[in-house]
Image: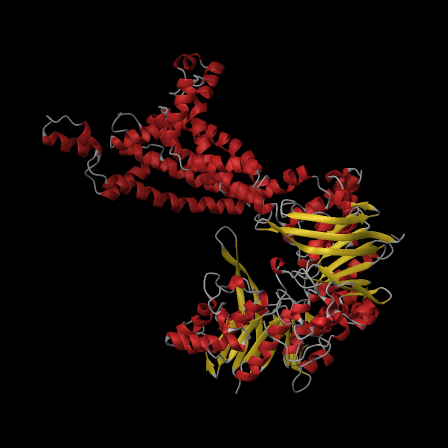
Amino acid sequence: MALLEVKDLKVHYPVHGGILGRVVDWVKAVDGVSFTISEGQTLGLVGESGSGKSTIGKAILGLSHITAGKILFDGKDITRSVRKNRSPFRKSVQMIFQDVYSSLNPRKRVLDIIAEPLRNFEKLSKAEERKRVDELLAIVGLSPDNASKYPFEFSGGQRQRIGVARAIALKPKLIVCDEPVSALDVSVQAQVLNHLKDIQQELGIAYLFISHDLGVVRHMCEDLTIMHNARFVETGTREDIYNEATHIYTKRLIAAIPDIDPLKRKENAANRKEVNALYDKEQDVWYKNGRGVYDLKPVSDTHYVAMQ
Amino acid sequence: MSNDTLLQIKDLRVSFRIEGQYYAAVDGVNLEIKKDEVFALVGESGCGKSAMALSISRLHNENYTQCAGEVLYEGKDLLSMTPAEMNNVRGGKIGMIFQDPLTAMNPLMRIGAQIEETLTYHTNLSRAEKKARALELLERVGMVNPALTYDQFPHELSGGMRQRSVIAIAIAAKPDLIIADEPTTALDVTIQAQILDLLDELRTGTGGSMILITHDLAVVADIADRVAVMYAGQIVETATVYDLFANPLHPYTRSLLHSMPSALTEEARLHTIQGIVPTLKNLPRTGCRFAERIPWHNASLHEENPTYHEVTPGHFVLCTCYKTFALGGGTHGTA
Amino acid sequence: MWKIVVRRLLILIPQLIALSLIVFFLAWLMPGDALRGLLDPSMPPGEMNRMREEAGLNDPWFVQYTRWVGNVLQGDLGRSLQHRVPVTRVIGDNMMNTVRLSIMTTVMLYAIALPLGLLAGRKHNKIPDKVIMLYVFTFFSIPTIVLALLMIFFFAFGLGWFPAMNAVDVRAAFEGGWPEFWSRIHHLILPSMTGAILGGTGIIYFLRNQVIDVQNSDYITTARAKGTPERRVYTHHVLRNALLPIAGGMGASIAAVVAGSLFIERTFTINGMGQLFFDSVLGRDWPVANALIMFYAVVGVVAGLLADITIMLVDPRIRIK
């Protein structure tokens, strides 16, 4: 059974206008997406800014209003109860944020930051709490004497590791990672990514990994889905997407990644040009009315593409 | 200085004031930018690459910054120029492109007016001529509807279009050198590709040069001719882009390359560098500055006063520690 | 943009209704009424009741309220209980004095605050900044009365440059024309300077911080990178962006100036609305007091609307097509 099942999720925001501020239009941030995540799995959610990928993460955590659709967690429908405090679901799903500078309260010590979820859900003695925090710090590779420091005393990568420690404090089953390494330098990014992988192996946590970086996603996720215009355009295994990209948008996205080999520069530029030309030419094939994304159709057991 | 040198930097030192004391963020850099080349400066945040870029045009707040050394542009030292002379160079000889195109433009001015401002200071064009030139520039940077964009404000444009406008502002007075500081970092990958292609295309045939500052080695591989890798205020390695990627020498360069997750290959573990980039106040000032990040290395492998070694023609590396560097196994994640 | 203005005007209506209710009940709750103070103690009690009945003071509150609102809408603010003439006439005499004082103060306020704020921000941490900040912190905490008295002491009694009281010279007022105009200006300088010096401190401080912020923003670096001369960087790029929030605070500033005139008028014995307000409250002349509170409230709301419109005009990001 799937750990998380999202069925036909829609998140629409009203646009107000006119003298009386009536609703004149809707912004469709997410417009009908379905997916499942099983225990210990990492699903990569890739898209460009404005594609709606972050909204999906927020909807699962109850941080944005759900217009239509269902969210099942462990088989239970939690669409309506997501927003309730103290629901067991709240304990089982955690989040890691992109902005490592504003996601940690600057006036709290690391100990308090990491212990906060514990204090909300578990009644521990001071000594037990301290022991758990030390363990959590060790998991993310920080020494216990960091517990009494404040966030500003840490570098970006260390802060993100504190964020990870906080997210895993309650032994969640799922962590929504929203661009967890986009603000970090490559060598620091590598540390955080390695930790995320280790933690997954040790604790069996599932990740919904939201990112715009195809390199990071390829490294982290065995399954991924590509999002464009509030819908999924292609879903499949890593091999399906990187080797058998079918939707023109996926192809364009992959062609745009610069190659680390300067010798392939010309070849890549030519390929990019070709795919871009194709993207312009085949608009009507892949999109209805220039924007609408079709429903996903299977091309193999694992590989689904949005097409007519 | 040879004939094809456009910009020569000699022993540049840029220091910032922290709590009343000056600390060098750029600490003795020597560089030559040739005519008609893309020169990339690579490094992680805090390595001094942006500080160096801004100091070429002297755009630091002089209340908190000291610059020493020489920056020779066509033989004339920019650091000793009067403000009026400097204003001729800025925009006229050197154009700048910044990371975040939204904050890089005045939110209260129309795009057209911002482009024309560059023209006002560096040409004698009439109003009508300036407008015609601005429209022409907007078309050159790939705007679909130049006349519309001319009258728009920055917030009305998409990220890619904003960066195109910033580029139009930078190239308006046909400068010989463009300094682009992380020009694609704030953009989506498809837009990044378009902007890189545009920068490349604008440069070809004009004989102009570009200094590209970036943390992304893939961007370097895509567009640069020569590369300098910076760490802790120093250049640790310079080479042509082909040499650098085929044969990276300095342990820092090699670590950077290995810690990148690639979209084209998969590896189980990413390489990481022990410790963190030191802050400006705590920058090591003697010996090999990278030594503390590779502590398993025997101290005798480093030079006491590191010097540059020309390993192959044009390929320079700082300190002798490159010779025996092996990527440390099992070193990840310790801080 | 007109849509927004119309919407704001529509929102004004419930605001004013709520306000009138508050004003009405404040007066209602005040102990005693206007008649009691005016009555002859030797009057028989029945006579007093008859007068109250006549003035409508014995009716239930909602009857009195609707009657009052109905009259206000027809431009009839009632009769002053103290002066026994229509409220409009009582106020009319004083209103022009207050309006003149407020305009003069506002002009001086910005004439002082804008250059000083810009200078302090531009010369951040240098001598001009330090001197200006010394002024700001000194005058921020001085009460109006104290400064007003000091101004009178030095410039009126000491140096004799300006008159210390009244809004105009009686003889000049009789002559009319230019002599009256100059006399009024001459009389206004000290009180408006007092208001401007005190009211300017907040704006200077705010503007200084704005300039410091703006001159570190990316687009200022871009402007410099174009080769913009330093002077022009300030006049063309820093100034407008730094002034935006000041324009937003304009409504509050104007309202503060009008409210501050209360004390200034009293000290300089100008017959303005502030003076009138004191008298009417002390004399329990509530038709006048009510009308004045309504006036002040309307000034506040309208000033807010003006500020919003100004921002919409200068900031393209808020402009609505």
Can residue B146 be seen here? The reply is no
The answer to whether C108 is drawn above or below residue A150 in the figure is above
Q: In x, y percent, where is residue B238?
A: 79, 63
Task: Compare residues C113 and C305 and report the one nearer the observer.
Answer: C113
Instruction: Work out whether C237 lies above or below A206.
Output: above
Query: Does C85 sit left or right of C313 as displayed?
Result: left
| Residue B83 position by quadrant | top right
Residue B264 in picture, x, y percent from top left = 73, 76
Q: Nearer the viewer, residue C123 or C253?
A: C123
Comparing A62 with B86, the one in front is B86
Q: Position of residue A301 (x, y in %)?
A: 65, 87
Q: How many marks?
A: 0
Q: Residue C181 location, x and y as percent?
A: 47, 18
Residue C171 lies, with reference to residue A52, above or below; the image says: above
Q: How is the image coloured?
A: secondary structure
Q: Is residue C61 left or right of residue C142?
A: left
Q: Is residue C224 visible?
A: yes
